């Protein structure tokens, strides 16, 4: 549609609105007494034959948005939608009050109307309402797109999600499933004795993840505050306080890059379990994912892109360094020794041979994880636990008793995406302080995502935290998996879009 055509449509729609006002029609009434939704009508009566509908003489009163207007002589038809289902409405001048038919003649594609009438089937067997009343509910002043195409329209879908929901029924289905997923997660954890809480979204010290925060300012206190990158340290304070099982489904904010799997604002599930370790969480995570998939989809077999993914217990468990060694050996055609991932110089040399850039502040552990992310992640299609991470990149995790360079930590990968991150929690305050100080040195060496020193959290640990394990699960990525969506922005109602960045930059 050209700009001129769109402008002409807008003028005509506004003219129709003024004509409705001249008829004495309230163009934006306060309410409408709807007896049933379109979806409810279709589910209750859509399977009946024309004979059954004629015998029952069922009348209804419903409302929806107009998605089609068709006229064939004296026979006129509307197609109405409530976002879940559609129904045809049969309009005849001799079946409506005179003003109602005048309203019909002033309708535009996209308007909202209420109808009352009897259910029947047309000669072509179409399930239909024979309208006896028509009420105007709201004018659509801008023409609706008929379909999406091209990259520009993809950005409009994200920035103007309301348009996406109007013209793409699949978008609504994604968000309905997302709601079922969140409900299933909550019911799973509550059913196992976990307490749901809410922790601060603005924090004086950003903590709980290696990430760059968004910074804001508290005017009354005249102090900087940070949008949380994770709720972890606040949830573990509650474990110190004696809440043995605790969780939060929360919004996190990280001032970092955007990709198909990353959005600056995203939803996480985090939970903590006293007296458990990371192996207990592996079993719990398997149960959680299977139950959520069964509840939300009715199956534990998923289609994601070209892959069929089976959420079948138990998931494979692979050692991080062994996965990296195998991938590097295959790429180079020679065996990589275990020590090549333990010493900084040897790890850096191996990375150079693989064409992977490292920075001066990265130790052997950080280099190993960089190689894992570059070489291995995309190949982990079926649900797989990758465990035993380097201590260097895990400042809040408990070390393995026989290997101080390694912590009891796992990440769960499905379809090449990290879905979960979990570990046995570090509860030794002296060791936690040492780790925080190491992070400060890394920050001084140029690592912007290094963890800050949180003195109050160390103080909380000094009061004593029992052995515990904790986990974070990316809700957005889980929904991507369950809906076969390949961009995180497809499963977030209002993601940050490129268009918004352009608008902000022009102010």
Image (cartoon, helix red, strand yellow):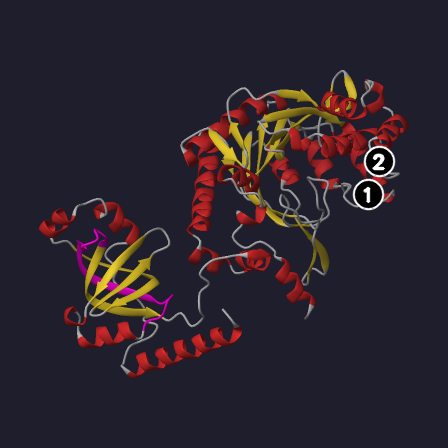
- Name the residue at 55% across, 44% down: 198
Q: Which residue is mark 2?
A: 362
Query: Label 1 crowding class (10 Å Cα cut-off): few <14, some 14-19, many 20+?
Result: some
- Are the residues tagged 2 and 1 within 8 Å (C-beta)? yes
Quarter of the image holding residue 218?
A: bottom right
Question: Is residue 114 covered in magenta?
Answer: yes
Quarter of the image holding residue 436?
A: top right
Furthest residue in direction bottom, as rendered: 22
Question: Is residue 311 covered in magenta?
Answer: no
Give how far apart the Cα atoms at labels 2 and 1 are. 8 Å
**Position of 319 relative to 211 (above/below):** above
Question: Which residue range is magenta in the image?
Answer: 107-127
- Name the residue at 46% across, 50% down: 171
Q: Which residue is mark 1?
A: 447
Query: Would residue 395 be visible to someone looking at this image?
Result: no
- Name the residue at 23% across, 46% down: 44
Q: Is residue 255 left or right of residue 153?
A: right
Quarter of the picture containing the C terminus is bottom right
Residue 283's spot in the image, x, y percent?
Answer: 55, 22
Furthest residue in direction left, as rendered: 55
Query: Label 2 crowding class (10 Å Cα cut-off): few <14, some 14-19, many 20+?
Result: some
Q: Is residue 432 left or right of residue 75?
A: right
> Residue 381 or 230: which is nearer the viewer?
381
Residue 35's spot in the image, x, y percent?
Answer: 23, 57
Residue 310 - label:
none
Furthest residue in direction right, as rendered: 345
Question: Considering the numbered disc 2 on the image, is that residue within a helix, a strand or a loop?
Answer: loop
Q: Is residue 183 left or right of residue 268?
A: left
> Residue 357 or 40: which is nearer the viewer?
357
């Amino acid at each position: 549609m050209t700009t001129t055509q769109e402008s002409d449509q807008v003028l005509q729609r506004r003219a129709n609105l003024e004509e409705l006002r001249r008829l004495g029609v309230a163009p934006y009434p306060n309410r409408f007494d709807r007896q049933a939704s379109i979806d409810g009508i279709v589910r209750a009566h859509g399977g009946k034959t024309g004979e059954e509908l004629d015998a029952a003489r069922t009348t209804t009163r419903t409302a929806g948005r107009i998605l089609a207007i068709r006229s064939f002589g004296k026979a006129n038809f509307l197609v109405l939608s409530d976002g879940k289902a559609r129904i045809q409405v049969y309009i005849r001048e001799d079946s409506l009050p005179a003003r109602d038919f005048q309203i019909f003649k002033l309708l535009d594609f996209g308007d909202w109307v209420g109808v009352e009438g009897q259910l029947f089937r047309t000669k072509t067997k179409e399930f239909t309402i024979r309208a006896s009343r028509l009420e105007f509910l709201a004018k659509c002043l801008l023409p609706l797109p008929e379909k999406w195409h091209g990259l520009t329209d993809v950005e409009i879908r994200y920035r103007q999600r309301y348009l996406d929901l109007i013209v793409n029924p699949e978008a609504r289905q994604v968000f309905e499933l997302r709601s079922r997923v969140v409900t299933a997660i909550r019911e799973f954890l509550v059913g196992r004795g976990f307490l749901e809480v809410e922790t601060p979204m603005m924090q004086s010290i950003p903590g709980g993840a290696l990430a760059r925060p968004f910074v804001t300012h508290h005017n009354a206190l005249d102090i900087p505050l940070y949008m949380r990158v994770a709720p972890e340290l606040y949830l573990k304070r509650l474990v110190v306080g004696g809440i043995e099982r605790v969780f939060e489904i929360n919004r996190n904010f990280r001032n970092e890059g955007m990709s198909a799997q990353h959005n600056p604002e995203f939803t996480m599930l985090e939970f903590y379990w006293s007296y458990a370790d990371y192996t207990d969480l592996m079993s719990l995570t398997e149960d959680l994912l299977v139950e959520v998939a069964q509840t939300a989809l009715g199956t534990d077999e998923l289609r994601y892109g070209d892959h069929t993914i089976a959420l079948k217990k138990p998931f494979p468990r692979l050692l991080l360094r062994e996965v990296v060694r195998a991938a590097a050996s295959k790429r180079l055609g020679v065996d990589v020794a275990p020590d090549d991932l333990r010493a900084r110089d040897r790890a850096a040399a191996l990375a150079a041979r693989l064409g992977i850039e490292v920075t001066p502040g990265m130790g052997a552990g950080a280099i190993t994880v960089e190689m894992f992310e570059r070489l291995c992640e995309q190949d982990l299609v079926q649900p797989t636990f990758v465990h035993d991470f380097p201590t260097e990149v895990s400042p809040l995790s408990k070390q393995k008793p026989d290997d101080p360079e390694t912590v009891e930590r796992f990440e769960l990968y499905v379809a090449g995406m990290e879905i979960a991150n979990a570990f046995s929690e570090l509860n030794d305050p002296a060791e936690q302080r040492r780790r925080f100080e190491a992070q400060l040195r890394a920050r001084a060496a140029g690592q912007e995502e290094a963890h800050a020193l949180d003195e109050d959290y160390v103080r909380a640990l000094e009061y004593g935290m029992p052995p515990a394990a904790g986990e974070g699960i990316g809700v957005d990525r889980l929904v991507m998996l369950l809906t076969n969506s390949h961009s995180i922005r497809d499963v977030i109602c209002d993601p940050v879009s490129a268009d918004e960045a352009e608008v902000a930059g022009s102010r």
